[in-house]
Amino acid sequence: MPRPLWSGAISFGLVTIPVKLMSATEDRSVRFHQVHTEDLGRVRVRKYCEAEDREVSAAEIGKGYEVSKDTLVAVTDEELEQMPLPTAKAIESVAFVPGASIDPVRLSGDSYFLQYDGQVAAKPYALIARALARNTKVAVAKLAWHGRERLVLLRVKDGALIAHVLKWDDEVRDPSELAPKDITVTDSEIDEALQLVDSMTTDDISGYQDEYRKALEAVLEAKAEGRQPPKPSTKAEEPGGQVVDLMAALQESVRKAQAARGEDAGDAEGHEIPKRPAAARRPGQLAVLADSCSRWCLSASRAACTSPGANPVQYG
């Protein structure tokens, strides 16, 4: 398990449960350094003071809030830590709601495990976990962390409590203007779309793998060993143009989905998709050579990844 990121307690009515917060996920993205393309020298970000026109150290850097265009107010870490917030060292439960009532768009993507802190916390921790496991409700709580108060959803998985950070109401934009207007869709087209949904339904998505990362790692491994990066085996198909016959496209999609499951044509019953083998982890860290990697990784992965943009390469 990773090291704790925060320690405090869950406030559950009059029950207090000491806990430690630990990241529930890990970032497996391949990260590049920025380099000078001529000699692969590292390009680093240096922090300069505009007033003195000189580089400053981390110890000289603080926080400032821009009140107006020409006015900054200094704020210290001590002032932030001493703000009178009841959630500064507690995850304060404020409500219990049906899990289905939480709009997924409010999930920020940050998830954390809550580990009970000490034997005295074991029983109340198990109590709330088992209570949540017996119904369809989740806990909504507030937590002050990293310079802001956050709304979190607490649920249970395999006996352990998990916290998912939620967006506040005013952080979610209204999507109503994005919906198509004055579009006619027939009942037959909807029925065919539902049949496609049924033919692609599964209870388990654990077998899917990051094909883009695998292709990128293969490129980097080859370049680190002085070999030519692998070439794509097939030419990627170009995205199609405007759909002329929507019903025909739906019917063909259903036929292909059923064929992939080994079903007879017209059989709309959903069956479990066979699990794909789990992705094998590559040993150790790859030695990264940055020159022309982007060009090679795009060509090598285009055939294997249907949506390369879904996992962008990040700089670190």
Image (cartoon, grey):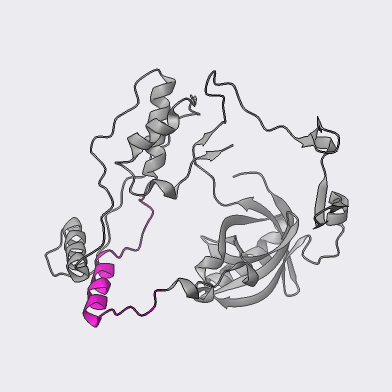
At a point 56% along the width and 26% down the height, the residue shown is: 35
Q: Which quarter of the figure is the C terminus placed in?
A: top right
> Which residue is at a point 72% across and 32% down the rendered structure image?
46
Residue farthest to the bottom?
A: 187
Magenta stretch?
180-208
> Is residue 31 placed above or below 178 in the rendered structure?
above
Measured from the top left, where is residue 266 in percent x and y? 13, 70
Q: Horizontally, is 236 left or right of 161 in the view?
A: left
Q: Residue at x 15, y 69 (%)?
A: 267
User: On screen, 270 above or below 24?
Assistant: below
Could you tell me residue 50's position as x and y percent?
A: 81, 38
**Near-viewer residue (11 or 80):** 80
Q: Nearer the viewer, residue 312 or 163?
A: 312
170 vs 298, left or right, is right
284 is higher (above) or lower (below) than 94: above
Would residue 69 appear left or right of 278 to someone viewing this image? right
The quarter holding residue 273 reads bottom left
Q: Position of residue 272 (x, y in %)?
A: 27, 61
Q: Give the vertical position of 14 relative to 32 (above or below).
A: below
Image mark count: 0
Q: Quadrant of residue 97?
A: bottom right
Q: Nearer the viewer, residue 156 or 30?
A: 30
Residue 205 magenta-highlighted = yes
* Horizontal and vertical percent position of residue 171: 62, 67
Q: Residue furthest front?
A: 70
Viewport quadrant of the N terminus: top right
Instruction: Tell whether position 7 is magenta.
Output: no
Is 97 left, or right, of 188 in this rendering?
A: right
